[in-house]
Amino acid sequence: MPGQNNSTVSEFILIGFSNFPHQLIPVFFFLFLLMYLFTLLGNLLVMATIWSQHSLHTPIYLFLCALSISEILYTFAIIPHMLADLLSTRHAIALMACASQMFFSFTFGFTHSFLLTVMGYDRYVAICHPLHYNVLMGPRGCAFLVAWSWAGGSVMGMVVTTAIFNLTFCGPNEVHHFFCHVPPLVKLACGDNVSVVAKGVGLVCIAALLGCCLLILLSYAFIVAAILKIPSAKGRHKAFSTCASHLIVVIVHYGFASVIYLKPKGPHSLEGDTLMGTTYTVLTPFLSPIIFSLRNKELKNALKKTFLSKLLPPGS
């Protein structure tokens, strides 16, 4: 974690929801609580199903299990504190707690992006090089890819957090967001190196995300080319159906991320920033297990077999 700096600020006040009407706060709390609980339940069900069904012990589902773990940890770094703030009258977070939240949110957020990239590579190998799949995506290779995804996420979290919290925060200490996010914190920093650090952090993050996005696009360019060579329509549909859930999650993930991080700079309301921030931190993890469960036939059948068959009476 970052070392000591010369900041006079010992805590920050998160005012992301302060400008909303008081009557809406309970609505936000129950909505976000239900979505968070569903996110946890959905990802835990996916993980339990994958581990209980031996037929799902294949690379793509092991990657999906790692993805579920990263989503659970990402939401745990942000949402519980956000829910507590919604019920609190003083939305304070200590300096080191703020640094920890930033570190874990960036670590698990980038781990999520790296795992989506790895899953795109898995689909590329499965469709474009099926005869070499068992060699290229063996247990050791899969473990290597997952380990590097987690290591890459940790490095990104450390780099961003160290750079931001080595800045000096002289006051004021009101963060115009509902968690410790880089842009509103940079606005509170003082010193000659603030703009340099902000540009450096922005370039590193954008380069990593664009790199992941380009690799996924490249994988799917080869996948589409290979699918178009399949003579039968049934064969093309079957090949594409194995990629559908991953592709939808990628579109949702990068679609919401681009809205948040690549929106034009200019005058905008605090309420607008807050609501757009919740789409990426609350809505995207909420949708991910739903998409994989509904769009993946093997996983959907395994979920029915593992859990629904135990809940429903025989013959129903």
Image (cartoon, helix red, strand yellow):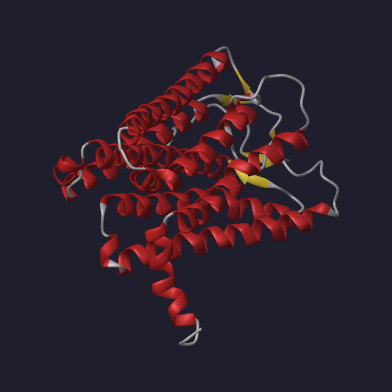
Position of 254 with respect to 176 (left or right) is left
Horizontal and vertical percent for residue 260? 61, 32
Foreground residue among 49 and 126: 126
In the figure, 264 relative to 156: above or below? above
**Residue sitting farthest toward the front:** 232
Position of 242 with respect to 279 (left or right) is left
Q: Where on the picture, by quarter, is residue 204?
A: top left
Q: How many marks?
A: 0
Horizontal and vertical percent for residue 58? 26, 55
Q: Residue at x 56, y 34 (%)?
A: 255
Q: Residue at x 43, y 63 (%)?
A: 300
Q: Residue at x 41, y 58 (%)?
A: 297
Horizontal and vertical percent for residue 277? 64, 39
Q: Where on the picture, by quarter, is residue 279?
A: top right
Q: Where on the picture, by quarter, is residue 10?
A: top right
**Residue sitting farthest toward the bottom:** 314
In the figure, 281 relative to 198: above or below? below
Foreground residue among 305 and 180: 305
Horizontal and vertical percent for residue 201? 49, 23
Q: Quadrant of the N terminus?
A: top left
Q: Residue at x 59, y 16 (%)?
A: 191
